Amino acid sequence: MSPSNFWDVQPALRALYGRCLEPVCRQYGISRTELDILLFLANNPSHDIAADISNLRGLAKSHVSTSLRSLDAHGYICRKPDMEDRRIVHLKCTDLAAPLIEDGRRQQIAFSEALFAGFPQEDRDRFQGYLTQIAQNVQSAMEVYEK
């Protein structure tokens, strides 16, 4: 594969990430979306409502809702109404989800190591800086188009 731009490599990145997470999904009997949600909540504790998951991960609200019901039924998450606005429900991973999250994070590290094999640390750090700048640029551009 010889990608000429970001869009060319994106499907392969998604496929590799899915393969990295697949053993965890199989081991715990959960879907990929359910694992994505648990990892999102564990890795982003300040984004703890369903709308955050949907918006920041680009997941359909219906998929998030279905997955949250399943995670709740398994005891992997708990829901807590917001004290100021009862329409808002905060989500938190339970202790029961801790081993699953730990295994998922290990696979996220394996994914990252596969991507950056052969890169010196300074290049990895530089790439992280580029991603941060790209995210800021995207946010600024989106604000222009929202006007």
Image: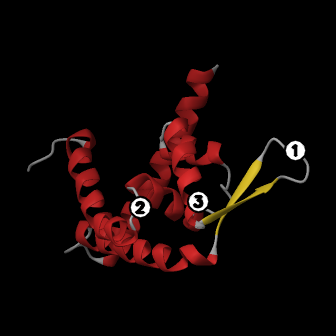
Q: Residues within 10 Å of mark 1 (few under 14, many from 20)?
A: few
Q: Is residue 5 left or right of residue 101?
A: left
Identify the disc placed on residue 94.
Answer: none
Q: Amino acid at mark 2?
A: Ile
Q: Which residue, given by chain and number where applicable, does mark 1 sit on? A: 85
Kindly indicate whether the residue at mark 3 contacts the one at mark 1 (C-beta within 8 angstroms): no
Q: CA distance from mark 2 to mark 3?
A: 12 Å
Residue at disc 3, secondary structure:
helix
Sequence order check: which comes first, mark 1 or mark 3? 3
Q: Give the amino acid type for the residue marked by disc 1 in the picture.
A: Asp
Q: Is residue 63 left or right of residue 89?
A: left
For this orientation, the residue located farthest to the left is 1
| Alpha carbon distance from label 2 to label 1 | 31 Å
Residue located beneath label 3 in the image: 73
- Residue positioned most to the right: 84
Determine the CA span between mark 1 and mark 3: 24 Å
Q: Is residue 69 or residue 37 the one in the foreground?
A: 69
Q: Nearer the viewer, mark 2 or mark 3?
A: 3
Q: According to the image, what is the colour scheme of the structure?
A: secondary structure
Q: Residue at x 30, y 74 (%)?
A: 110
SS at mark 1 in the image: loop
Residue highlighted by disc 2: 30
The answer to whether residue 51 is above or below residue 28 is above
Determine which quarter of the picture holds residue 86. Answer: top right
